[in-house]
Amino acid sequence: MSKLAFIGGTGVYDPGILTDLHSEIIDTPYGKASYESGRFGDKEIIFLARHGVHHTIPPHKINYRANIYALKMLDVKAVVSTTAVGSLNPDYKAGELVLVDQFIDMTKSREGTFYDGEHYGVAHLDMTHPYCETLRQAIIRAAEEEHITLHPHGTYICTEGPRFETPAEIKAYRQWGADVVGMTNLPECVLAREAEICYSTISMVTNFAAGISDTPLSHREVVDCMNHNLESFKKIITILSRTYDPDTECSCHHAAKDFGGFHLL
């Protein structure tokens, strides 16, 4: 049976809504991936803590390929990820959620594709709509049901990390049209599309970015804001776990059709 999965970012290490939760490690062609499997009613739900359950993996060291491949092995067809972000948009304030719909990739050293000329050959997938619109609409409806402030659009710029950005970088990113900045959405988003998995990201604004904020940035500030506003994530995740069918027909499930589709090795 196809499954729904949640990928938790900074501050989201436990979905808090699942029963019969147990931890697993799975071997993939790209290395090991750890995840938790639990139940929501009669549904099996997968939860993966992107940084590890104790936040021991920095953004540039996350094995994104192993994580997404593992979800494919587990017959996951839809993924909702969470990320902590800094805001470059004065309308997006700390504690608010942004449902990003575009990205700018400024990462440098990450393994960013399954189509690297080895196992899956070479392919060039269309990324006009990098985030699943079907899943995005379901998230928007869930937020409306719970009366949660959710900005329905936003451009996420992904930096390499683990350092925060300089004010000069943020000034440039604002000119490019970025709304929020984070360190983990790429290449995760691209890999999910290559693997023909529906994927959407809910970003929590934890602070204004460097040069916009009046104070120096700190990781503690990010974690504290996430912890304070975690309930919004949980409410949306609860509704999706109850109502979303990962087998809902979607073009994401055929994203690699021009290249023969994505099949497990």
Image (spheres, rainbow, N blue to C red):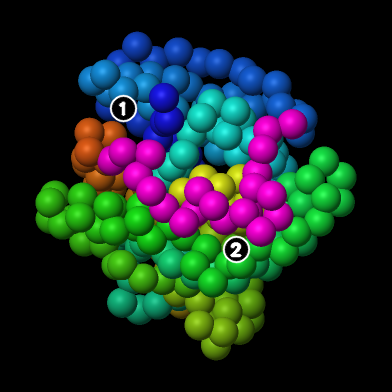
Q: Please give the name of the residue rendered at 70% of the width and 55% of the height, measured from the top-left corner.
A: 259
Quadrant containing the N terminus is: top left
Q: Nearer the viewer, residue 91 or 22?
A: 22
Q: Residue 2 location in percent, x, y?
A: 43, 30
Amino acid at pointer 2: Cys
> Image check: 244 left or right of 72?
left
Residue 203 found in image quarter:
bottom left
Q: Please give the name of the residue rendered at 55% of the width and 88% of the height, measured from the top-left corner.
A: 175
Amino acid at pointer 1: Gly
Looking at the image, which residue sits at the far right?
A: 118
Q: Please give the name of the residue rendered at 64% of the width and 27% of the height, measured from the top-left corner.
A: 33
Highlighted magenta segment, given as a residue range: 244-265
Q: Nearer the viewer, residue 251 or 6?
A: 251
Residue 230 found in image quarter:
top left
Chief secondary structure of the magenta span? loop
Kind of element beneath mark 1: loop
How far apart, in angstroms, are the residues tagged by discs 1 and 2? 27 Å
Q: Residue 192 location in percent, x, y?
A: 57, 48
Q: Which residue is mark 1?
A: 16
Q: Residue 254 location in percent, x, y?
A: 54, 52
Quadrant containing the C terminus is: top right
